[in-house]
């Protein structure tokens, strides 16, 4: 499933002429692997959406974006 989502992302990036897009799949609850990857790769900025698949049209940040913002050592940008 991850592979098929990431293939779609790669195809979309290619259709927008975005160079250097790389996708990675990791196992686990989403927030920790995202934060660990950022730390291991000296990432400057993590960009997330404000809502994901659990969208109920709420006003609050989803729990993944909230956890990543709390756990990460680098800056995070939440796109609305
Ligand atoms: N499994 C995941 N892999 C990669 N990024 C994710 C994953 N889940 C969430 N995200 C990122 O976090 C953003 C917010 O999703 P989040 O899960 O926090 O919101 P939600 O689904 O509305 O809330 P909740 O999951 O708490 O019900 C997504 O737009 C995406 O950028
Ligand atoms: Mg979610």
Image: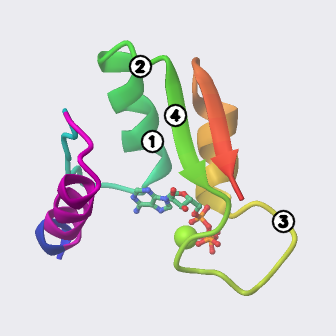
Mark 2–mark 1 Cα distance, whole angstroms, equals 14 Å
Residue 41 location (% of width, % of height): 30, 18
Residue plotted at (70% across, 49% down): 66
Residue named by callout 1: 32
Query: Would you say 40 lies left or right of 68 here?
Result: left
Distance from disc 1 to disc 4, alpha carbons, whole Å, reads 13 Å
Q: In this picture, which residue range is highlighted in magenta?
A: 5-19
Callout in the foreground (1, 3) = 3
Q: Camera-side residue: 41 or 71?
A: 41
Residue 15 percent coordinates (x, y) = 22, 60
Instruction: Specify the quadrant that holds the C terminus.
Output: bottom right
Percent from the top left, x then y, of residue 4?
14, 74
Label 4 belongs to which residue? 46
Q: Main secondary structure of the magenta part?
A: helix
First reached walking from the N terminus: tag 1 or tag 4:
1
**Residue 29 within the segment the image draws in magenta:** no
Q: Is label 3 in contact with label 4 (beta carbons under 8 Å)?
A: no
Q: Is residue 46 left or right of residue 78?
A: left
- Name the residue tied to disc 3: 60
């Amino acid at each position: 499933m991850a592979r098929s989502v990431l293939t779609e992302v790669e195809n979309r990036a290619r259709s927008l002429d975005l160079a250097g897009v790389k996708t990675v799949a990791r196992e686990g609850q989403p927030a920790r692997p995202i934060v660990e990857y950022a730390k291991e790769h000296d990432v400057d900025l993590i960009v997330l959406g404000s809502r994901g698949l659990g969208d109920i049209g709420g006003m609050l940040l989803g729990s993944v974006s909230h956890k990543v913002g709390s756990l990460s050592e680098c800056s995070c940008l939440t796109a609305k």
